[in-house]
Image: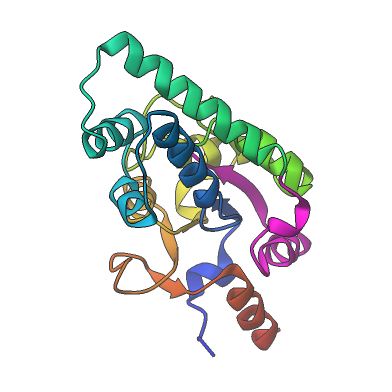
Amino acid sequence: MNHLPDFLTTARGALFDLDGVIVDTAKYHYQAWKRLANELRFDFTELDNERLKGVSRMRSLDILLEIGKFDIGEALRERMSILKDNWYVEYISRMSEDEILSGAREYIQYLRSQGVKTALGSASRNAPLILEKLRITDLFDAIIDGNCVTHAKPDPEVFLRGAEALGLPPESCVVYEDAEAGVEAAHRAGMKAVGIGTAEALPEADFIVASLGELLGDHAAVL
């Protein structure tokens, strides 16, 4: 059982990344990239997909085309990128509320019951659709997503805008992240960061847990 740090028990705002913290949509990205590769008549494996983690959409497309040994023009690259995104949206449109990660709903509900304001801080432009499918839109006082920001993490924009939307100073907010770039963005915003994952993957996080559900158990222990 972890001993909760003071910044977690005194925070007035909680800012959550989406993918890897509340839900796992990585499988749908993989399915969409694999479908594109199959359309181009080559295979794209899960091992190949590891090369795309933490990489931008267009760079991911470049890697996929390198694997398939394709050299195409800019206009066709853009069309392929749009096609992949359309397939991804098709897949997440079929999501159900039971795909939320274990303990995530309950932990956010717990924070809200304690008077903590909650916001989503995600780079995904499809965040509103995913929240709708999970039926958790109403768990957030503010939603800052890829449609609202111009700079990607590790730029702190998404979290600074989240704190502003909650009406709170950045230093009173805690960020929940599963990526190094997100942890860096939190620190650049003047916020503490809870890493969802492992200390090896997130060495700069201020506190590490395997899941939000684990945090819920820790909070219960100190009540």
Q: Residue at x 43, y 73 (%)?
A: 208
In the rendered image, residue 153 lying in the magenta stretch gets the answer no
The part of the chain drawn in magenta is 95-123
Nearer the observer, 116 or 77: 77
Q: Residue furthest bottom?
A: 1
Q: Residue at x 75, y 61 (%)?
A: 109
Q: Residue furthest front?
A: 41
List x then y, in percent, for residue 2: 51, 86
Q: Quadrant of residue 152?
A: top left
List x then y, in percent, for residue 118: 65, 50
Instruction: Name the quadrant of the N terminus.
Output: bottom right
> How many numbered discs sit on the rendered protein?
0
Nearer the observer, 206 or 148: 148
Decide: is 212 above or below 15: below
List x then y, in percent, for residue 20: 51, 57
Q: Residue at x 37, y 52 (%)?
A: 45
Q: Residue at x 46, y 46 (%)?
A: 30
Decide: is 76 above or below 182: above
Q: Is residue 123 visible?
A: no
List x then y, in percent, for residue 101: 64, 63
Q: Is residue 31 visible?
A: yes
In the rendered image, residue 100 lying in the magenta stretch gets the answer yes
Q: Residue furthest top?
A: 75
Instruction: Name the quadrant of the C terminus.
Output: bottom right
Question: What colour scheme was applied to this rendering of the protein?
Answer: rainbow
